[in-house]
Amino acid sequence: MGVWWGPAVRVLVLQAAWALVGGQVRYSVPEEAEAGTVVGRLAQDLGLEAVDPEARRLRLVAQGRRASVEVSGASGALVVSSRLDREELCGKSAPCALRLEVLVERPLRVFHVELEVTDINDNAPLFPAARKNLSIAESSLPGSRFPLEGASDADIGANAQLSYTLSPSDSFRLDLEKSNEGTIVPDIVLTKPLDRETVAVHRLMVTASDGGRPPLTGTMEVVISVLDANDNAPQFNQSVYKVQLPESAAEGTLVARVNATDPDEGINSEVTYTVTSFYPVSEEDIITVNPKTGEMRLTGALDFEEVKIIHFRIEARDKGTPPLSGHCRVVLEVVDVNDNAPEVWVTSLSVPVPEDAAVGTVVALLSVSDRDSGANGRVRCAAWPPSPFGLVSTFAGSYSLVLRESLDRERVAEYEVEVRAEDGGAPPLRASRAVRVPVSDVNDNAPAFAQAVYTVLARENNAAGAELARLWARDPDEAGNGRVSYSVAEGGGGGAAAVVGGWRPASSYVSVDAESGRLWALQPLDYEEVQVLQFEVRAVDAGEPPLCGNATVQVFVVDENDNAPALLPAAGGGPWAGASGEAASSGPGSGALWAWAAWGAPAGQVVAKIRAVDADSGYNAWLRYELWEPREKGPFRVGLYSGEVSTARALEEADGPRQRLVIVVRDHGEPARSATATLSVSLVEGAEAALAAAGSSSSSSSSPSSSGAGLRPAAGAEGGAAAAAAAAAATTNVWLVVAICAVSSLFLLAVVLYGASRWAPRAAVLSGPGPATLVCASEVGSWSYSQRQSRSLCVADGAGKSDLMVFSPNFPPPPGPAAKETQPEPPALLDTVSGPPFLASRPFPLFASLARVALLARRLGRRWWEPGSAPGPAGGGCWSGA
């Protein structure tokens, strides 16, 4: 008997305890438990352990749904009979509890059993689509946001808490926004400008991970196509629309009306609206939007118990090619009860607000009230965005909208401040009032030119009133503060130009239109007078006080071929002087020239030299000489670039007593200009030619270099032929001695200078106040071009030597006392030194003395190359011009 008393007492105690708690037993089982898993010892927990469960016919009755569990008849245990899926049984509801009824007979009793199915992490995050295609304009600015459809997880709790990651990308990053309900919405944000020509398509992978252990993941490929067109995307008047609707709203009810504007014109400004990115995805068919008006209406019934808040996005797409789109987020809150929402009124509004308004300035006064009472009538207000404006409570139900940060109209010209009111009800109701706050301009920005320095090329001889350039300065201010006027700055050294003979103000050459900024020429420009105009243009706005900006304008005058070559007179000064072989002329443009030649002179002997100069520069001043008459092959020829007239063959008596040559001097300009010289060459006997050369050498300052050249014969020359021959022989002997001495001196001087050059440092060959700018040489000679002035130093020792041209700085110094002290002297032709090139580059006194000795010997031994002769392979003459 003692053996049976113990269990009987326990049964009685369990039955009494079961009666106290209402006869209900709770079990917990994880979902996806295998069939046959024991959930609990039901018979024992119900106090039926002492009784045979089969005898009392213990059985399970489910209430309204498949239980997936059963009672084992043998043991009375509650076991899993089929697959348990919490998501299928309860969806997103938590906790998931199944209410079961257990029946026993003899006597008949009903027991209530509650079975809770706990969640396990058996569902991976799932995106609505495995691939998302985005089209992004190439001109999209960094920081642009592009919405993505978030993933969903059928689990609950920590197993449904999602996090997102983005595959490595140099151009994009993933930004997560957390809503008030705790859901995370992913956006793709552009981090740097796109270049469609470099990468046309970006392929990114978005990974969603849940909070389970271990976590499960889901992926979505985002294919971003970069659009080459740079149109303006539609912009909504606000980025977030919050809407509240009662769950009893009928189909067709207007949810909200969105408005997006596109600053483009025509078809590019026509906007169509579409709904995208629903969360939860199951509600994507409950809202529709009118593609033209932007009205959103209900297409299905709302159920507060199922969905309390619906998130979706409105896409505004224009009809351009390619189309661009803008997005806004809409938050639809389903209200369970129809309480009164707070109301916001603007009682006073002081707009526009000057951009220099002090912090704390009151912009508007607002009144807030709620017809409800108690906690539902207590209203809290806030301004959105929180800066640069904020709300300050003055007394109950009244607020002041005040300035919290400094304003900048050039950055934001108008603010759309949303005043949000929320009561203390459960759930709270909200209302908002949009306050438009325009910002007025003050003159806080000076005009700024697009370039600090404008370089303008103007051809000389341009017409007066011709437009040279167009200047433009930007002032971001508006109205009079942004209206810019232009003028040429006078004084201060920035408005003058160096001309031949002094300085002249730049305003005498150019003028700038005060309104358009066009730069005009007041008079034709002459390159020979001025090469560079440098001045400042001032842009002044109409604000109070006015602000200004400056820009430097450099006008380079481009040379035109407007000067024909001019023939130079003989070096001796007289019209018939020509002992050196240089033909004499009767005028600067053209004229008759005379020269002498002896019968029997060999081929290649120089008879005369034509000298000409061109006032232009560069190619326009590079001269060439052509023999125009006689057309047929004659006994004389002309050096193409040297101008030397020499014998083409040995002269014979058959050539006649006189030869008439017509020589044309042309420059290399377009079109080319020319001058004509007529040279009469008298053919005489050798004694007469020697007599003429001796008589000419006594009156000429040039050294002889052409044998056989003579003067025009004087009257009675035939009578003194013998005396002339004797004088010529004596003169020839003297010159031979002088030449031998000169050559020996030059050789010794060259040896000394070569030794000195081995020990002395080499210095740059400089001339003039500024650095060298341009040297041009060719196999036929050298020519130079300078924008200001040029100095030349030529070294020639026969044919084939190039010239060294050194130039002054491009820009003249400003006028004034300082400029007079530092202003370079007018350009001058330098002497030509024959010898080693380093003669002119040694600044030491000894070398300078030796150079002067060499120069004296050069004058005694050879003839001078005259300045202004055209460069060529047969001459080392130098030409230099302004």
Image (tube, helix red, strand yellow):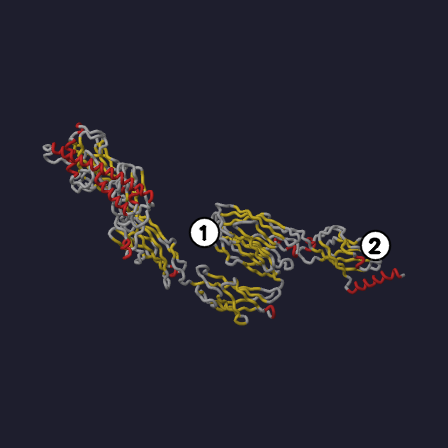
In the rendered image, the residue lying farthest to the right is: 1
Query: Residue 612: percent from the left, percent from the top?
Result: 23, 41
Residue 671 seen anywhere in this rendered image of the structure: no
Q: In the rendered view, would you say 428 is above or below 842?
A: below
Identify which amino acid the numbered label 1 is placed on: Gly
Label 1 belongs to which residue?
A: 266
In the rendered image, the residue lying farthest to the bottom is: 395
Identify which amino acid the numbered label 2 is placed on: Glu
Instruction: Find numbered disc 2 in the image and state the secondary structure of the residue it sits on.
Output: loop
Q: Residue at x 33, y 56 (%)?
A: 537
Mark pair 1, 2: CA separation: 85 Å
Residue 117 seen anywhere in this rendered image of the structure: yes
Asked if marks 1 and 2 touch (Cβ < 8 Å), the reply is no
Label 2 belongs to which residue?
A: 54
Nearest to the observer: residue 320 or residue 785: 785
In the rendered image, the residue lying farthest to the top is: 654
Q: Residue at x 40, y 62 (%)?
A: 443
Instruction: Find numbered disc 1 in the image and state the secondary structure of the residue it sits on.
Output: helix
Q: Nearer the viewer, mark 1 or mark 2?
A: 2
Query: Residue 340: percent from the left, percent from the top?
Result: 59, 66
Query: Residue 258: percent from the left, percent from the top?
Result: 52, 57
Could you tell which of marks 1 and 2 lies nearer the N-terminus? 2
